Amino acid sequence: FSSGRELLEIAARESLSFSEMALANERTFRSEEELRTGLRRIRTTMEACVERGCRTAGILPGGLNVERRAPDLYRVLTERETSGTADPLIVLDWVDLFAMAVNEENAAGGRVVTAPTNGAAGIIPAVMHYFTRFCPGASDDRVDRFLLTAAVIGSLYKRNASISGAEVGCQGEVG
């Protein structure tokens, strides 16, 4: 597929979800076991990036003396969580924290995953991390489906626009 329209037409014609389409495509290059192992490696690396970003305090490199914010926000959210405060929008705070943790790790030159892109946004690892940490029913299979779906959508942007923050700015990358 080379457009969103083609993607939707193929999915409807073949009665496949986007993740099933990606899985079928990937099976032409590698075994399903190799694919699942690769997806686990991506997931583990993304999770480690979020965790490091949430606990690593200090000043980011570059000479502007920008202090990392993720560790303090993590502490605040953890305290709020244990206080029993019921805020229906707290999900956004957690996802924002996880994205910030990734973006600070990126800015610090830490290990990150570009799947399909990491850059300044960290959206894929943030949403995945929230899902695995807070959502009942999270499983390896559902995370695999999430990553495969993200790859399908990301490939449309890569083919028809750009996923490069350096080329089109962070807004293009986030798109």
Image (cartoon, rainbow, N blue to C red):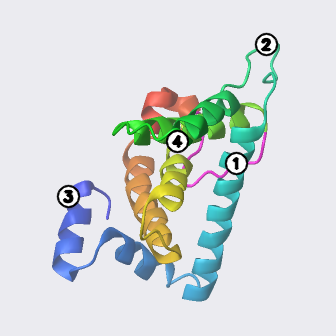
Mark 3 to mark 4: distance in Å?
42 Å
Q: Write down the residue under mark 4.
A: 81
Mark 2 to mark 4: distance in Å?
30 Å
Mark 4 to mark 1: distance in Å?
17 Å
x 55%, y 54%: residue: 129
Task: Give the amino acid type for the residue marked by disc 2 in the picture.
Answer: Asn
Q: Of the residues tagged 3 and 1, which is closer to the observer?
A: 1
Which label sits on residue 135? none
Earlier sequence position, callout 4 versus callout 1 = 1
Q: Of the residues tagged 4 and 1, which is closer to the observer?
A: 4
Q: Write down the residue under mark 1.
A: 51
x 42%, y 38%: residue: 90
Q: Which quadrant is the C terminus positioned in? A: top left
Task: Give the amino acid type for the residue marked by disc 1 in the picture.
Answer: Glu
Front-most of residues 95 and 72: 72
Give the crowd class for mark 1: few <14, some 14-19, many >=20 residues within 10 Å: some
Q: Of the residues tagged 3 and 2, which is closer to the observer?
A: 2
Question: Does the segment drawn in magenta span residue 115?
Answer: yes
Q: Where residue 13 appears, x then y in whole percent?
A: 17, 78
Mark 1 to mark 2: distance in Å?
22 Å
Task: Determine contact: label 1, label 2, CB under 8 Å.
Answer: no
Say which element carries label 1.
Answer: helix
Front-most of residues 167 and 77: 77
Q: Of the residues tagged 3 and 4, which is closer to the observer?
A: 4
The prevailing secondary structure element of the residues shown in magenta is loop
Earlier sequence position, callout 3 versus callout 4 = 3
Which label sits on residue 5? 3
Report the magenta residues as a range.
110-120
Q: Write down the residue under mark 2.
A: 65
Say which element carries label 3.
Answer: helix
State left or right for residue 23 relative to residue 72. left
